[in-house]
Amino acid sequence: MITYLIYSTLSLGILLLIYRTVLIKEKMYHFNRGYLLFSLVFSLTIPLVPVGIFGDFLMPHEISEISAPSSVQNSESVEVYPFIDGESYQTNAEAGSGAEGLFTSLLIGIYVIVVLILFVRLLRIIHMIQVRADRNPSTLFEGLEVVLLSENVVPHTFLSTIYVNKKRFESGKTGRDVLLHEAAHAKQKHSIDILFVEFLKIIFWFNPLLYYYKKAIHLNHEFLADDAVLKSGVSTIDYQKTLLQTLLHKPTCTLASSIHFGLTKMRFQMMNKSINKLKSVMKILSLIPLFLVMALFLGCESTPADAERSAKEIIIEMTDSEMIILNGEKMDVSELDGKLQELSVNDELHFTVKEHPEMKRGPFFKVNSLIQHYTDPKENHGQSLVQIKINEESEIIANGKTLTLDELKSFLDEKALNSSHIIDLRVNRNSEFQTILDVQKVLRVQDALRINYSVYKGKDDSGSNLYPSQTLTLPPIPPSAITRQEISDAASKKAEVIDQNDLLTILINAQGMILANDQPETISSIKNRVKSFVGNYGSDPGLSLSPKSATLAIKTDRHTEYETYREILDEILAAYNDLWDEVSRERFGVPFSSLAENSEEYREIREAYPKRISIVKPD
């Protein structure tokens, strides 16, 4: 939209400047009328027409819709600094979007209100003109209705009706040349031009150039009417005296064509100006290349031939296992990439994903990543790829070169990364946990990057057994360590003391063993443990008093497999989703997923079971 407004305004300005410097002094009024109207239509439509060959030459680095993940501190509704809200884990697009969305909604609201006010104002003016015509006597002049008004007004015309002062008309002071002038306005339908500009002003009320166009069109109408009067045989000197006499009367409304409008020295000069046909024709012909060049520069980029492909609908149904259903065909999620490669050879793919209440997050993330790969038009179009790998020995390798953490920072700074780059971050499942977190912190500093994250298994880096996360989402950075009794709020420098019963500490050691408050658990059992802990409501004196005070702390070993950590975090988030769904069905009779995100019901459920999760820094 910004590009459209810039291009259309630029075109309006150039064409108006050409009119004011080249055409206005030429006695070719009918052509100028068409030029001004065509300039409006051309400028407001050419940025939408695919005739351009230069693309966005003014704005080549338009802001990408893809951005780097937000830090935990900027996540939505973070109550205590170490806590993370699950929404920032699931999708970074929501982080920090509240204020921007509110500002956008405010601008849209202001725009709509102004449009409505201007539209009502226009209807009111038209209504008042019509009331005048209905409530006052009228006569005819050359087949046109002449309304006789009691007000001392300037003769003016709206559509096919002429409005004059009754006393001056009956006393003969409104001369025939004045009536001929107004009749020219009516016969040439000048009011249609003015109404067209008024409607454009309602839609683009913020564009000042439209007001200059209206003034130019009004003045050209006066040139046309003056020319019609002089061609009828009226003396130029007598007619100019009539124009001067109209200065003594009141101006009329902005929609009417009035003899009073634009009474300038230029009008008198144009009446005496001779026509140079050769010069006029040369000026007209010179405009053709001007419009062609402007179309090439300001028109949107035409669609390449290879992009005109047929669309194929792809429906993917998730299940409660590693299996998915692709257009009715059941297959393992690992087979999806190969199948989509076959389908995308000659067709553009349009995806629909049907979720399953018991679906596993790993397969879901894999499907989501592949969908983005096959639908993102920038995915495979010459973007620079920076590959960063953390191997089994926790070495950091960037584009094949082994670097320290400080060297990685310098490496990224030297590349001056922007939205045209993709970072492919690949982590060995046996890499040191702290090294992974340190690299993530470095990447979060980079701006407007596309980050693809995956965990690989084995030393051969064959790409098999990938476990990709959701595209653009990196797991939250663990803040400072916490104890079972106290969590430090680094952001506000406060401390929140947590009752021992309200804290569930989940420990994951290097071998993948899990302890929840010193009791052994498995990945498959951790979800039920969290649900019973958070939803206890004080029933069990050894568990949390209420969901609002229930706090989860996840602590890992430096050698904990990152895949295990992600699986456990997925199970915890799934537990909250189950709790939300249960209370939503109980209170409102519908699943939580069907509630509108900004609705009171949605907020009520989230407030009943707030996520209080802390990731503890490894020892």
Image: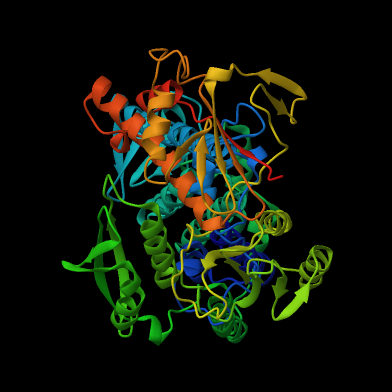
Q: In this view, does 105 lie to the left or right of 413?
A: left
Q: In which quarter of the image is residue 401?
A: bottom right
Q: Which residue is drawn at 74% across and 30% down?
A: 491
Q: Quadrant of residue 96?
A: top right
Q: Residue at x 36, y 60 (%)?
A: 363
Q: Quarter holding the C terminus?
A: top right
User: Of 370 and 250, which appears nearest the observer?
Assistant: 370
Q: Where is residue 166 in the image (x, y as percent from the top left)?
A: 41, 29
User: Of 44 and 523, which appears nearest the observer?
Assistant: 523
Q: How is the image coloured?
A: rainbow
Q: Residue furthest left?
A: 328
User: Of 439 and 38, which appears nearest the observer?
Assistant: 439
Q: In this view, does 551 lie to the left or right of 368?
A: right
Q: Where is residue 126 in the image (x, y as percent from the top left)?
A: 38, 35
Q: Is residue 447 left or right of residue 317?
A: right
Q: Is residue 67 left or right of residue 321?
A: right
Q: Where is residue 610 in the image (x, y as percent from the top left)?
A: 48, 26
